[in-house]
Amino acid sequence: MAGEIVLGALAPHPPHLVYAENPEQNEAFAEGGWETLRWGYQRLARKLKNLDYDVMVVFTPHWQTYIGTHFLGLPHFKSKSVDPVFPNLFRFNYDLTVDVELAEAMHDEAAAAGIITKMMKNPDFRVDYGTIVSCHLLNPTWDKPIVTISSNRNTHYYSAEVMNEQSAALGRACRKAIEESGKKVVLVSSHSLSHRHFTTEAPLPEDMSREHIYNHSNYVWDMKLIEMMREGKMKEVVDILPEYTEQTIAETDAGAFTWMMSALGYPEYPAEIYGYQSVIGTGNLVASWDPNEQTRELVL
């Protein structure tokens, strides 16, 4: 039986969201905060609980590789993840399982397409917080294996246009590997939208009276993208990502969103919107793309 992508999720990874949830794995304690995003995540997590899938494939901006695209290549990783910018908020003890078979299939398919690839087989490798935050908020029970894909920094080496082309090629390769695997897969694009952020932190990070988008221009850009997502214009969204990325310093610079849209075949159906809110000035959207017309719904 052919494998398939059963859902694509845009899953931002501010560590603040895990901090605010107070899970047992995280050492910091919060009094709440960023409820619009957290409640949206909880709604999407419930959808995933009712979805039949085998593995979650995550493309993260915070595993940055400068030579090629890397994939986690061992069945188990366990350690502590400390956010380098917010160690006061995020000190997370993770214990996760990797679907190495699917990771290797994606690696091989990408390599066959001419993309430089590598399997990460260092048992002491620390999994990045982007992977951990997105996976935890989508599936807090951690009862599904994952595959993590690194971000090859084409935007920085070349341009956002080159990033779009390379990420689209990777998306096509991953889709082919998934179809040949026979597995049902959820794709996760782990990043914010606009990404200009404050350079100072409030005395109490979860003080919501201090939280707002960095500037109105970024807000307008984010809303334009969300409007196009609602209208099912995903090819058009990807086409304007280079300009959007430059204007808003967006985290779309990593290529995750282009990768996911390419793998999904640039959906022409509306996205499911679960929530938009600022975190330290950045614009964050929780959304999903459901290829199944029977289970697709208008959330917000």
Image (tube, rainbow, N blue to C red):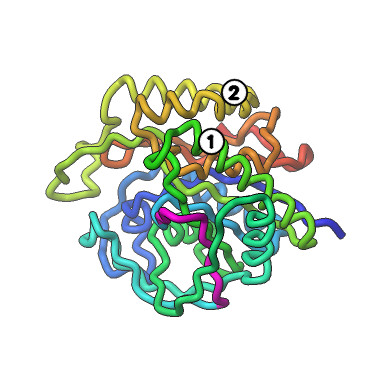
Which residue is painted at 63% across and 70% down in the image? 99
The N terminus: image quadrant: bottom right
Q: Amino acid at mark 1?
A: Asn
Q: Is residue 222 above or below residue 296?
A: above
Tell me the residue that label 2 is attached to. 236
In the rendering, at what x and y percent does residue 23 appear?
38, 66
In this view, the residue in front, 93 or 169, is 169
Which residue is nearer to you in this view: 186 or 29?
A: 186
Which amino acid type is shown beneath numbered disc 2?
Answer: Glu
Number of residues whose C-alpha sits closer than 10 Å to that of mark 2, classed few (under 14), some (14–19) or many (20 or more): few
Q: For the view shown, which residue lies furthest in the right direction?
A: 1
Q: Residue at x 38, y 35 (%)?
A: 250
Reading the chain from its start, which is encountered first: label 2 or label 1? 1
Rendered location of residue 180, percent (x, y): 79, 58
Q: Position of residue 261 (x, y in %)?
A: 62, 38
| Mark drawn on residue 153 | none
Label 2's element? helix
Taking the view exactly as shown, the residue that stands out farthest to the left is 203
Image depth: mark 2 or mark 1 in front: 1
Corner quadrant of residue 200: top left
Kindly identify the residue that appears in the image at 43 percent across and 77 percent down: 78
Q: Is residue 39 above or below residue 120?
A: above
Q: Residue at x 64, y 54 (%)?
A: 110
Residue at mark 1 = 164
Report the magenta residues as a range. Answer: 64-75
Does residue 271 belong to the magenta stretch? no
Q: Is residue 79 left or right of residue 184?
A: left
Quarter of the image where one finds residue 270:
top right
**Mark 1 residue element:** helix
